[in-house]
Image (cartoon, rainbow, N blue to C red):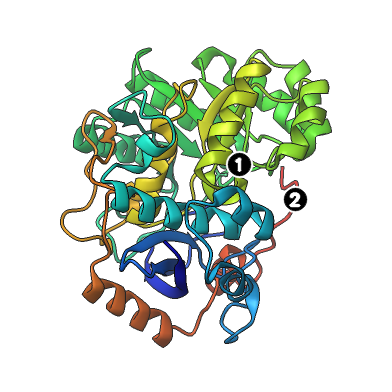
Amino acid sequence: MRITDLKTTPVAFPDPPLRNAWGVHAPLAFRTIVELTTDEGITGIAETYGASVGSVLSSESEPGQGPFAAARRVLIGMDPYHLNRIRILIPSPRVYQAVEIACLDIIGQAVGKPICDLLGGAVRDRVLFAAYLFFKYDGDDPWGEVNTPEAMVREAEMFVERYGFRTLKLKGGVLPPAEEVETIRLLRERFGPEYQLRLDPNAIWSVETSIRVAQQLEPYDLEYLEDPTWGIAGMAEVARRTAIPLATNMCVTRFEDIPQAVRASAVNVILGDHHSWGGLTAFQRLGHVCATFSLGMSMHSNTHLGLSMAAMIHAAAITPNLITACDTHYMWLQEDIIVGDMFRFEEGMLRVPTAPGLGVRLDRDKLARFHERYLKSQERMRDDTAAMRRRDPNYLPLRPRW
Ligand code: GKR
Ligand code: MG
């Protein structure tokens, strides 16, 4: 079998005004759909970043330019089974991951097996996810405004009632730390010890603030505190002064970061993400490394659609030591581009797809509509700070802010 073409389709879709340490999500989120065709008539699909902050895809809108155009030149004529060669030829993990998933989707369809079976098989049939709680402004969405600790408890109740989540992750770094501690206090009061609580202020606190806030959080039995402060040295300093386990998707983002983080005892848990670490095989490899160093493993997420959702479920299913709930933004999504129903959480879990390949297919009409929305949009990339400055022209994304 030979790859005959690679096509990327940028798409845009509505995103609620979710607040974070950089600002707020803009009304539209962006992703890129990748399709690989073969001479045997099988098409493999994957989803990757839009031209978002930190993405490598920003020059993709220029025809013939950008990393996917370069990848296309490498891939045409190659065998989708030859992933080790392809990985060497496409050194960017963010580009390779989409190519890997599209190739695995092709292989899965060719042999009639789901992707997880191509990578050693699933160790679980259902994957546990966390409710991703965000402070938010009122928007064109069913959730309303959530800007106080009390309103956050109501948001959490709604997600728990609807989808049965047992892990609640609060996106912090938005309200002053005392109000976020109060939010955790109220969540713990409302949700008993069988619920796991996490807080992630995205490194917006100084080391001193992080130590003080961590000590205030100690009575509430957090599963972990994620990225309270910036960098491996800062995290190590905080780790020395709190009993709460620290997790990160900010100071350990590549395999090269792991030795220093381990030497400094900076973190207890690493949140992997197949989109940025280099695909499902890299995610699985990260699982092995975490197990070797007795680090916990969790999964990071960013706003995404159902192709990424399917890949995230496969990634979790093939990683035995991923025993905590994974992050996803999917519960905030109102419409997907996959054929048939959207993924639906039951008891806070999603079923591992069993259909061949990725297990989901693209709804062509929706893809066209989502692409049209992208073409009509004035924006091309995610910029949470710009979106916040449209609401408040004086807003400055200070780091640290507290
Ligand atoms: O979607 O606002 C968001 C999150 O804050 C996202 O940008 C982070 O990358 O979810 C992520 C995290 O865990 O840090
Ligand atoms: Mg995080």
Other-residue count near label 2 (Cα within 10 Å), few / some / many at <14 / 14–19 / ≥20? some
Q: Amino acid at mark 1?
A: Pro
Q: Is residue 209 left or right of residue 24?
A: right
Instruction: Check disc 1 and report its element: helix, strand or loop.
Output: loop
Q: Amino acid at mark 2?
A: Arg
**In front here: 26 or 112?**
112
Check if mark 1's residue and mark 2's residue have beta carbons within 8 Å.
no
- Residue ranking furthest to the left: 340
Q: Residue 230: x, y in percent?
A: 75, 40
Other-residue count near label 1 (Cα within 10 Å), few / some / many at <14 / 14–19 / ≥20? few
Q: Residue 117: x, y in percent?
A: 35, 35
The residue carrying mark 2 is: 399
The residue carrying mark 1 is: 176
User: Where the C terminus falls, by quadrant?
Assistant: top right
Q: Is residue 309 left or right of residue 100?
A: left
Q: Is residue 179 visible?
A: no
